[in-house]
Amino acid sequence: MRTDLAVVGAGPAGIAAALAAALRGIRVALADAAPGPGGQYFRQPAPGLGAEGAVPRNARRTWTRLRDALAASTVDVRPEHHVWCVERESGRLTVHALLGPEQRASFELRADAVLLATGGYETVLPFPGWTLPGVVTAGGAQAMLKGGLVTPGHTVVVAGTGPLLLPVATGLAAAGVRVAALVESTDPARLPRHARALAGKLPEAAGYAARLLRHRVPVLTRHTVVRAHGEERLTGVTVPALDARGRVRPGTERLLPCDALAVGHGMLPHTDLAETLGCRLDGHAVAVDAEQRTDVPGVWAAGEATGVGGAALALAEGHIAGRSIAARLRGTAPDADTWAPAGRARARGRTAAAALHALHSPPAHWGEDVPDDTVICRCEEVTAGAVREALTLGAGDTRTVKLLTRAGMGWCQGRVCAPGVAAVTGCPPAPARRPFARPVPLGVLAAQHDRTTPHDDHPRPEEGSP
């Protein structure tokens, strides 16, 4: 299939970019792995459930506007397209995707430009018992509630750090779950120094606080989960207080009975496709210019892939990218004045995102306190002790630790365990350099090889024959 612009990811950034470009006469195909557009923030229940989505109340009007605009547009929306690679050859870009729930059939989309709106993923720092049934990520609990209208348990502890914990706790409480506690490791005394940058976020936070109070959810700040208990499944968690330096205060441990734990320690950008294309990274995020262009010709990026900052920032970045792409594909220089409101929203969003990142940090020295028998890499069942042993064998970076222990070689390819390995070793995370963004059936790769490899239909004569 051929199009002008291929947008990978149908969250806020992808939808905003697709609409902005399509309104300016650009042919747009919007691919996403989910059954419908919206991303995690605007995630909708499966159609068969016959229910409205649990979109945050302050964003329902925005979602209705985006949904209706997308339905009325010329954008070719392609759900259940699992993009595993984007190639750039001879100035042309090809998006490779697997189709449907089984992901066995393949699809290729050729485009003059590609926007990567691939979102982000959660970080969870391991602790004893985190592999027990009943322990899920905070975003996983939210996805269960939004997409399946189910909850992870009857009594839930929401723990970790970051702004995602608030909507997760309030959403579960509103669904009838008993939220035993919201456990946040951040010290609230740090908030005043970031108050100015977060002024636009304070009304939203106040709304969440009011709902927590209404549902009588206890809030434990400057606390953290250090152990999950249970045999066949989760039965409770141990939660101690943290001192001013972020270390566990001995003697402050308390046991919170629960049958589910929703835990998260922030988010990281999804950069697999960008790295495969050779896009430069700025820290963990895809580096972009004022137009949201990467340093690879024809490739733009927007939303959480360029830095985790929430839906409003993603919408602004997506709109700017869509207008930039439309102008560039028409052969004209974009006029930044035409997206000035989005530019101002982007500036505010990035300032707030930087403040939130500085405010919400995992407990200090966490990696030092993880017991040796704690599983760090779930796929390969590598423990913290094995990771530390790799250091004694001479490993000086996470890549060497991976080679010595297999931590990061499993199904998730290090997406889950890389932060834990880095924390335990004290080494900065190494670039992933994954060739594919998701597992691909060998049959798909073989078929692609057959299509792209020249074949000689005539047998070669034997040496010395006429």
Image: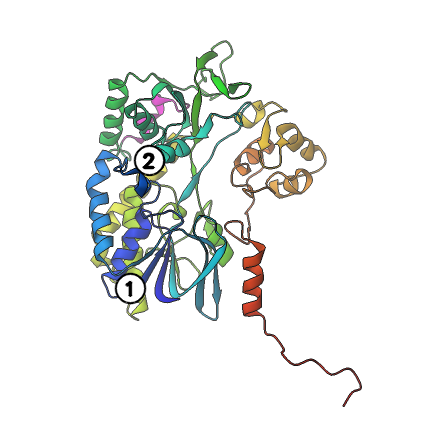
Counting labels gives: 2
The quadrant of the rendering that contains the C terminus is: bottom right
Percent coordinates x, y for residue 65 in the rendering:
20, 47
Residue at 63%, 30% in the rendered image: 383
Residue identified by numbered label 2 = 146
Percent coordinates x, y for residue 439 in the rendering:
53, 49
On the rendered structure, is 299 left or right of 238? left
Q: Mark 2 packing: few (<14 Cα in 10 Å), some, or many (20+)?
A: many
Q: Which residues lie in the magenta part?
A: 183-195
Residue at 45%, 18% in the rendered image: 242
On the rendered structure, is 376 left or right of 215? right
Which of the 4 quarters of the picture holds residue 260? Answer: top left
Placement of 256 over or under 385, stated as above or below: above
Residue identified by numbered label 1 = 326
Residue at 23%, 22% in the rendered image: 210
Placement of 255 over or under 414, stated as above or below: above
Placement of 441 over or under 216, stated as above or below: below
Q: Amino acid at mark 2?
A: Lys
Placement of 122 over or under 215, stated as above or below: below
Q: Nearer the viewer, residue 349 or 215?
A: 215
Question: Along the polypeptide, which appears first: circle 2 or circle 1?
Answer: 2
Looking at the image, the residue that sits furthest to the front is: 48
Percent coordinates x, y for residue 423 in the rendering:
55, 32
Q: Is residue 353 visible?
A: yes
